[in-house]
Structures are given as C-alpha cells and as structure tokens.
Image: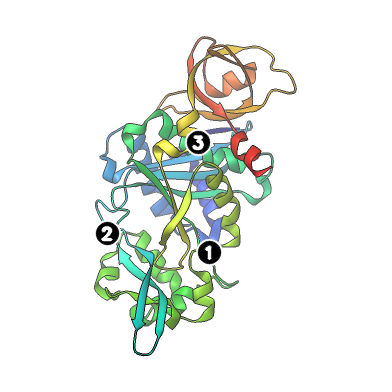
Amino acid sequence: MIVRPAQITDLPALLALARLAGRGASSLPASEERLIHRLRWAQRTFAEQVERADADYLFVLEDDDRQVIGVSGLTGAVGLREPWYNYRVGLTISASVDLGIQRHLPTLFLNNEMTGQSGLCSLFLHPDHRLGGRGRLLSLARLMFVAQFPHLFGDRLIAELRGRADEQGCSPFWDSVGRHFFKMDFRHADHLSWLGNKSFIAELMPRQPLYTCLLTEKAQAAIGQPHADSEAALKILAAEGFAHQGYIDIFDAGPVIEAPLSGIRTVRDSQLLELAIGSPDNLAPPWLIHNRRLENCRITSAPARRVGDSLMVDRLTAKRLQLQPGDSVRAVPLLNHRAQAVAA
C-alpha cells in the first residue's frame, strides 16, 4: 500500500469512490467536471504553484496492483478566500435575585475563529478494504506530509467531522435550526457551501446567540456528536492529539476537532532517519514512512527496525517509496504506544 498525490489519471477511480461515499462526502462530489477541476488544482498545489489560501492537497491510497482504494485531502488554509463559519458552544447565565432563580443556558455563537487554519478533509476508504490498518495509513499519511512540510500549513490543523443524520441523510440539527432561515434542505445547503457559495450564510443566519433549549431534543442531542461513519476517523485523530474544543459544524452540528501542529503525535515524534534494506523480524513494529518528497510524495506503513540513525525495511518497502539504501526518510511508529499504555 502506498499513499501518493492524486493524478488526473485517477479520475475514474475517484469518481467511483465518490459515488460510493454518497451523501456523507460533500467535499468529494460525484461530479466528473468538479473532480477534474480538483485534480488539476491538486497537481498545481503539489507543484507549489498556488498560494496557501488556495492550496488543496489530494492524496490517494493505492495497493500493489495499482488500484486506487481510498482518498484523503488537506487544505492549506480555510476562510482566507471565502468565509468559514462554525458555531462555538458557549454558556449564558441568567439570574433573578428576587425570584431566587439562576439558569445556565447553553448557546451557539456564529464565528469565523478558524480562519487561516489548515484542514483535513475528503477522507474515504472503499468499504471492501477497511481492514489491516489501511484507514489509519490513509488518515495519518496527511499528518506525515504536514510534519515534512510544516511551512505550507497553519499552526493548527482542524477537521470537521460529519454530524448525525437519519437513513435518508436528513440532519435533525439542520431541521431544527437552518431550515427555518434558509428554506432549503440540508443537502442543498451543504452542497452550496462546498461550492464556495458561503455568502448566503452570513446574509441569512442570525447573528445573535441561539439558545439550544429552544431546539428539538434530537437537535440538542446531535450537538458535537459524530455520525457513526465518522467514529473510526475520530478515534484515530484523537489518539494523535486532536480534541473537540466546543466548535461545531453549522449545518449538522458535527464536532470540529483541532490540534496545534506541535501537539500532533505524528508531527512531534517523527524523525529523519537513513533508509537501510534488510529483513526486519516478525516482531518488528509497523512504521509510517515518508520519502520526504513533495511533488513525488510517497508514504507507506511497513514493519521496520530502527538501528541507531537508520531505519531497516525490506526491499518491497523501499521500492514502494522509490528510494535506495542511504536515502533520507521521515518516519514514526504507526501506532501511538504512549496512548495505548495510558488506556491500558
């Protein structure tokens, strides 16, 4: 398995993945025209021909038969070209001394506080291949890329996780909040937002705090809760140091998780090592390994053994990375053993 930059030749495979992803992946539309545009823009991004505000890094996961089975993405910065809105969950305290009443009322504040930060997006793995650590590789490869090229990104990474929805793709939060102001269904609003037509949010969404006690019980229960399909992604990123700090998506109330670059395990703990070829034993732990290239980026996970300042891998791993013995790699253990030890 290898994670590499997406190419225009990957269009048929990405279109098939987008159709499988369906309603839950607004950032991966099943539109040939839009995917062609995004692939071409991604190629310009990897070639460093765009500014950070416009950067869109799109990766694919490819097996040894050169079949594309997954996709993931990174944005250089959110909100620098088009407004980027979230709700921040806060608290309003109301009190009456005469009546002896004090109320703590959760509230939602519309804000642009994530502007300028970099974002994780477009994560989708073919349902038939969600075993063997492939999802972890696909997700963490982006963090390894950030570790190698931190100057291309903001000082924090964020990820908007999909919120709760019913079997028809309807969001209880949207039905209780957004529908009253926008007069359109959830999918249409989310689609317009991803296209960049975000001005309607500022024009129609109330600026005053929203009291959550006025929402339906289902809508209140959805605030900050991930969709079942996003729970695995959340668990992987939480082990890397991402946390929910009270920001939610304005459409479905899914959690926006975040982490400073310096606090992300893969970024913080990755090291530059010299590649060596040998035969790691059966007990060798899996490592995440980056060939340190940008436009010809290759990232994989494989059993490896650290020996001094060298990382020993087998010949197939070196071939996947398109490297020779003595080349420099950036590497980190694939699993967060520190978090596992604390959990135990």
Give the class, few, some or many, for how many residues have Cα within 10 Å of label 3's Cα (few <14, many ≥20). many
At horizontal 39% and vertical 53% (from top left) the residue drawn is: 34
Is 270 situated above or below 54? above
**Residue 144 visible at all:** no
Q: Position of residue 57 (x, y in %)?
A: 40, 40
- Quadrant in the picture for residue 296: top left
Looking at the picture, how far across and down is residue 333, in whole percent? 58, 29
Q: Amino acid at mark 3?
A: Arg
Disc 1 secondary structure class? loop
**Which amino acid does the dot numbered 1 rest on?**
Gln
Which of the two discs, 1 and 3, labels the residue nearer the N terminus?
1
Q: Tag 2: Cα neighbours inside 10 Å, few (<14), some, or many (≥20)?
A: some
The disc labelled 2 sits on which kind of residue? Pro
In primary-sequence order, the first of circles 2 and 3 is 2
Q: Of all residues shown, which one is farthest toward the bottom?
A: 99
Residue farthest right in this picture:
282
* Image point (38%, 72%), residue name: 107
Q: Which one is in front, 11 or 156?
A: 156
Tag on residue 265? 3
Q: Judging from the image, what secondary structure is the residue with disc 2 in?
A: loop
Q: Are marks 1 and 3 in contact (CB under 8 Å)?
A: no
Seen at 44% across and 72% down, the residue is 186
- What is the C-alpha distance between the residues marked 1 and 2? 24 Å
Disc on the earlier residue, 1 or 2: 2
Q: Are marks 1 and 2 in contact (CB under 8 Å)?
A: no
Residue 83, numbered label: 2
Q: Which residue is mark 1?
A: 225
